[in-house]
Image (cartoon, grey):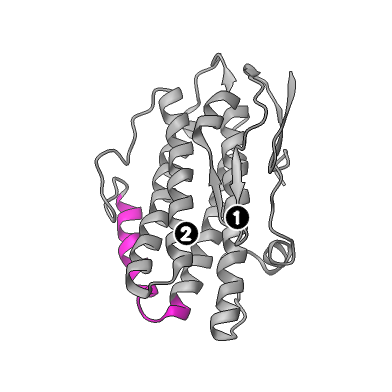
Amino acid sequence: MKTILIVALLAVTAWVTMGAVAPVSAAKLTVVDAEGITSTNTDVLQGVLAEPVYSALSENEKAGLIYMREEEKLAHDVYVTLYAKWGLPLFSNIANSEATHMSAIKVLLDRYGIADPAAGNGVGEFTNPTLQGLYDQLVAQGSKSLADALKLGAAIEEIDILDLQTRLAQTGNANIQLVYRNLMKGSENHLRAFTSTLQRQTGETYVPQYLDQNSFNSIAGSSTERGGRRWGNS
C-alpha cells in the first residue's frame, strides 16, 4: 500500500511492506529553518509509522537502531560541548535538532520493544565504548580552534550520512527507512550549514574527510532539502 503524506515542508512517499501507513495531514514531520537546521516532529512521526507492526526486526535492524540512537546522541553531545566552548549559536541550534533525531530513533526503539542504550546517560556518557572514546577524541579536536570545531561538525555529519547509508542497506522495514532517510536529509543539511559557516567565518573551503569528493560535491552543490527523502538505496 502506498500513502502520500503532503505537508507544508515535507512530502514523504513510503512503500509499505509490513503494515499500513496512517495518513496524516496539515502537519510537519520535518522542519527546516533558514540555516538548514533540520528537526523531526516525533508526535507526527508516531502517526505516520506503519500500524500495526507485523514483523519482528532482524538482529541487524535492532543493532542499527541501537547504534544510531547513540550516534545521534554523540553528535548532540559534541555540539553542546562545542557551543559551551565557542559560543557559536550554530552549535546550539544543531544540537537542539540532533535531540529531535535522537527522539525519532527512540520512537522506533519503543515501538519494537528494544531497550534504550542512552537511558540515564548524561552529556558525554555512552553505553557503546567505541562511541565513548570517540566523544572524548572529538571534543579535544574541536576545542583547538573555531575552525577546527566547524570542520569537526562537518566531519560528524559525513560519518552520519555514511552510517545511515549502511543501515538503510540492511533493512526493508518501511518505518525504519522513513526515519533513516529523513535523518539523512538532516545530516546533509547540517553538513552544508557547517561548511558554509566555515567559509564565512574563516574563508576556508572545507575538504571532505570521509565522503568521496563526488558525493560531497553533490551534497554541497545542492540547495537545502525541504522535501521528503527519496526512496531507494541511492
**Label 1 amino acid?**
Asp
Say what secondary structure mark 2 lies in: helix
Q: Is residue 217 above or below residue 186?
A: below
Residue at image point 29% right, 54% down: 123
Query: Considering depth in this image, is 43 or 115 the residue closer to the camera?
Result: 43
Q: Residue 14 appears at what percent x and percent y?
A: 70, 29
User: Does 133 appear in magenta?
Assistant: yes
Q: Quadrant of the N terminus?
A: top right
Q: Residue 209 appears at what percent x and percent y?
A: 56, 70
Task: Provide the major secondary structure of the magenta segment.
Answer: helix
Q: Is residue 152 above or below residue 80?
A: below
Q: Which residue is mark 2?
A: 93
Q: Is residue 32 above or below residue 116?
A: below
Residue at image point 34% right, 54% down: 130
Neighbour tally class for label 1: few under 14, some 14-19, many 20 plus, Cα within 10 Å: few
Q: Can see residue 165?
A: no
Residue at image point 32% right, 68% down: 84
What's drawn in magenta, residue-wise?
Answer: 129-148
Q: Dots 1 and 2: beta carbons under 8 Å?
A: yes
**Label 2 amino acid?**
Asn
Circle on res. 179 = none
Q: Can see residue 148?
A: yes
Q: Is residue 65 left or right of residue 216?
A: left
Circle on res. 33 = 1
Quarter holding residue 182: top right
Q: Is residue 234 above or below residue 137?
A: above
